[in-house]
Image (cartoon, helix red, strand yellow):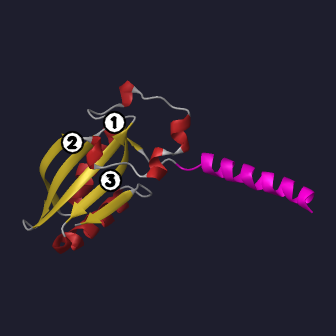
Amino acid sequence: MKRSALPFFLAAILALVVGFSCQHDPSIEGNAFVPQFRKAVKHGGFSIAREETVSKDEAPLPLSIRWHPRRWHTQSSPDSAVGNADGADHFGLVRDRTSRVECFVRYFDGRAQFVLIRANANESLAAMNLRSTLTQAFPDFPIQIEIN
């Protein structure tokens, strides 16, 4: 009985490895992402009050992005890099002059990989509206909200 389970077990492992390595990469070239991001933010009723480059530690990449199979066989491309090939941009967003939301775009290999939205508890509705707006503009793109 143990002997007949081995081929099934090996086939299951092979299917898992193949399935994991064929995952869709939702990242977007940084040069293309930034203008689309600005347009989506404006369309959602937000305005950019502040924009700055910050340390990549401000928006750490989730494990699922750091271990994505695309990174197994690619190298950084200096030609595709925005000003921030492996870092983060911080956008201070305002809506209706009262709602303030902090938004971080995390880059890796010159590609936008992840958006982190931070807001206070009383601004959680604005944060959820921003995520909804960005999800419409960037389907399948990883967007996370942190409420403080």
Residue plotted at (18% across, 63% down): 45
Camera-near label (2 vs 3) is 2
* Residue 26 visible: no
Q: CA distance from mark 2 to mark 1?
A: 11 Å
How many other residues sit within 10 Å of disc 3, few (<14), some (14-19) or many (≥20)? many
Q: Which quadrant of the structure image shows residue 103?
A: bottom left
Q: Tell me which numbered mark, 2 or 1, is placed earlier along the sequence.
A: 2
Q: Is residue 54 left or right of residue 19?
A: left
As drawn, the label of residue 86 is 1
Q: Which residue is mark 3?
A: 115
* 110 vs 35, nearest the viewer: 110
Q: CA distance from mark 2 to mark 3?
A: 14 Å
Q: Which residue is mark 2?
A: 54
Magenta span dominant secondary structure = helix
Residue plotted at (51% across, 38% down): 71
Quadrant the N terminus occupies: bottom right
Q: CA distance from mark 3 to mark 1?
A: 14 Å
Query: Does residue 4 belong to the magenta stretch?
Result: yes
How many other residues sit within 10 Å of disc 2, few (<14), some (14-19) or many (≥20)? some
Local SS, label 1? loop
Local SS, label 2? strand
**Kind of residue sitting beneath label 3:** Val
Residue plotted at (29% across, 48% down): 105
Quadrant the C terminus occupies: bottom left
* 123 vs 60, nearest the viewer: 60
Q: Tell me which numbered mark, 2 or 3, is placed earlier along the sequence.
A: 2
Residue 69 percent coordinates (x, y): 55, 43
Question: Bounds of the magenta span?
Answer: 1-24
Q: Which quadrant of the structure image shows residue 4?
A: bottom right
